[in-house]
Structure formats: structure tokens, C-alpha cells
Image (cartoon, helix red, strand yellow):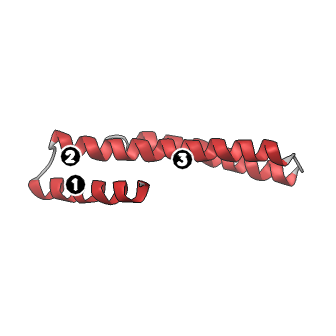
């Protein structure tokens, strides 16, 4: 898929953010501040899901690849959309 690199970069940033969250808890930071950061991570993860779904949808719409590949992508897209509901 075309946008995997973008998804990986986003996940690397999230990984750093989660590490910082652990440090915040270890340092005894107040819970509202920690929860706010957890919600930011959750939102960032939603952004990764959006990138993946958009990439999969684009591959289906653009018709790139063999008929078998298109069927596989369409099946994966249906599965992913079902998970999001």
C-alpha cells in the first residue's frame, strides 16, 4: 500500500508519546494531565486508522493490481470498516 510509510511515522511518534506517558506516571504527575495525554494518544491512533482505511479504499477505487488483488483489498476494507463501527 502506498501510505504505509506515513502510518509507520505516525506510530513512531505515538510510541514516543506513550513512553512519555509512562514517565509522567512514574514521576507522579497529576491524573488530569496524564488523562489528557492519553486522550491525545487515542486520537493519534485514530489518525493511523484513517490513513490505513484511506489507503485501502484508494487501492480499491483506483483498481491497481490484478482482479484477485482487488478482491483481497475489498475484503480487507469490509473487514476494517466492520471493526470501526
**Would residue 20 be found to the left or right of residue 48 on screen?**
right
Which residue is found at the position 19% from the left and 41% from the top?
A: 61
Distance, label 1 to label 2, CA atoms, is 6 Å
The residue that appears at 20% across and 46% down in the rendered structure is 60
Q: Is mark 3 on a helix, strand or loop?
A: helix
Residue 1 position within the rendered picture, expressed as x and y whole percent measured from the top left: 30, 46
Residue identified by numbered label 2:
60
Residue 36 visible within the image? yes
Q: Do the residues labelled 1 and 2 touch (CB within 8 Å)?
A: yes
Q: How crowded is mark 2: few (under 14 residues within 10 Å), some or many (20 or more)?
A: some
Residue situated in front as seen by the camera: 13 or 72: 72
The quarter of the picture where the C terminus appears is bottom left
Q: Nearer the viewer, residue 78 or 51?
A: 78
* Label of residue 14 in the image: none
- Find disc 3 in the rendering and name its residue: 45
Q: Are marks 2 and 3 in contact (CB under 8 Å)?
A: no
Amino acid at each position: 500500500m502506498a501510505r504505509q510509510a506515513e502510518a509507520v511515522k505516525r506510530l513512531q511518534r505515538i510510541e514516543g508519546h506513550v513512553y512519555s506517558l509512562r514517565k509522567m506516571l512514574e514521576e507522579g504527575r497529576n491524573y488530569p494531565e496524564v488523562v489528557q495525554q492519553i486522550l491525545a494518544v487515542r486520537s493519534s491512533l485514530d489518525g493511523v486508522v484513517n490513513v490505513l482505511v484511506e489507503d485501502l479504499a484508494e487501492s480499491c477505487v483506483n483498481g491497481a493490481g490484478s482482479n484477485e488483488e482487488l478482491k483481497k483489498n475489498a475484503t480487507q476494507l469490509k473487514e476494517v470498516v466492520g471493526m470501526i463501527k
